[in-house]
Image: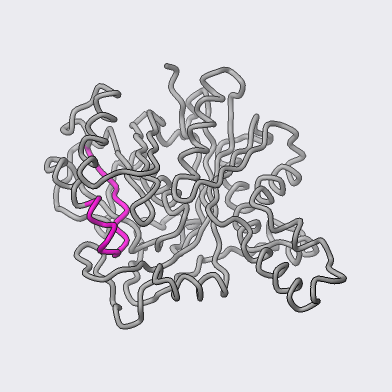
Amino acid sequence: MNPVYINSAACISVQDTLNENFLENLKPEYSTLVLKAIEPAYKEFIPPAMIRRMSKTVKMSSVASHYALKEAGIENPDAIIVGTGIGCSQDSEKFLKNVLDNNEEFLTPTYFIQSTHNTVAGQIALGLQCHAYNFTYVNTSSSLEFSFLDAKLQIIDGDAENVLVGSTDEQTERTMELYKLNKTIKKEEDLPVDYLNSETHGVVWGEGASFFVLGKEKAVNCYAQLKDIQIVNILELGETQDFIKEFLNKNNLANTNIDAVILGFSGDSKSDVYYNKVTELFTGSSLLYYKHLSGEFNTASGFSTFIACHILKNQEIPEVMMINDLKKGEIRNILLYNHLGGNDHSLVLLGKV
């Protein structure tokens, strides 16, 4: 199978990830229930008249995709693929509020048109005047992984040479209230969060947008090789280790060949047990976690993929992410494992180029 390369990576998150030195300034957050993304000055990238009509996720994605394409030296990709969990929920809420406030009469269609999940991919394409393949995946916590898989197949099958792949999710006031009511988000009394040894349910919620350019050819500033992806919707706890072993066997790798494992510990005691099972398999690898930096959200794996790309390129692991104190001399293979609340499990294997 032909290799697929990640030639650029850009991220807007609760960390200052647009800053070149962001790895040195990563700040964990243990005492806030909802984390807000650090947003750039949008007027530098988007005309003011358009900014007013864009939801937060569209604005974040427009800027992140701009950085990704610029870094890869691509003006017009052969495909645009975006993964999102809750899409443009700000405009969805505005539309539903208008429905209630106006007794279902005299409604303007703008919020409804902009509330659909594929608005992000569509707006990016409009901005680029790109008429190529345009697709959006909405598969909760594996939305980005499905997007990667699609892009990989497009490149391997010869339908595309450079694909813009992204993930994005935003917060909205009403949705956060509902997440607190159904105990998706932790209670105030459960703060500060112990991400690795939590005894309480619920998570700290975040947001962000991560974009990558996948290419058939390795660029000069290439970050990593996207080796393989595996996705399963439902996984019993006792099947976790076999799920990992089968994935490694398929790629002719042993546990000892994995130099670093990035796990999605979220501080939810009910679902973090899956990650504990995985740590038992990799006693000789660097074990890392990241949701104390990004928060939990549907496409939080975009943040971990972005970080993994930088780790492979710089051969440097941020201390703030380390679970154990083991560091290998060379980082060649990184395994990323993520799920959301115990469902939609995904594995992504990245390799050094």
Q: Is residue 33 left or right of residue 40?
A: left
At which x and y percent is residue 267?
A: 29, 65
**Whether residue 137 is situated above or below residue 115 in the rendered picture:** above
Question: Does the magenta portion include 318?
Answer: no
Q: Quadrant of residue 308?
A: top left
Q: Is residue 338 above or below residue 200?
A: above
> Which one is nearer the viewer's eye here, 135 or 164?
135
Q: How is the image coloured?
A: one colour
Nearest the viewer among 10 and 279 is 279
Work out whether 249 lies above or below 213.
Answer: above
Q: Give the image location of residue 57, x and y in percent.
A: 61, 59
Q: Quadrant of the C terminus?
A: top left
Quadrant placement of the N terminus: top left
Q: Magenta part of the protein: which range?
A: 259-275
Identified at 54% across, 23% down, the residue is: 155
To which quarter of the image does residue 78 belong? top right
Residue 181 at x, y percent in the picture? 45, 75
Q: Position of residue 25 (x, y in %)?
A: 37, 63
Depth check: give the residue in front, 249 or 155. Answer: 249
The quarter of the picture where residue 174 lies is bottom right
Q: Residue at x 32, y 44 (%)?
A: 337
| Location of residue 48 with respect to 322 vertically, above or below | below
Residue 264 shown in magenta: yes
Query: Who's the residue at 56% across and 25% down the image?
Result: 154
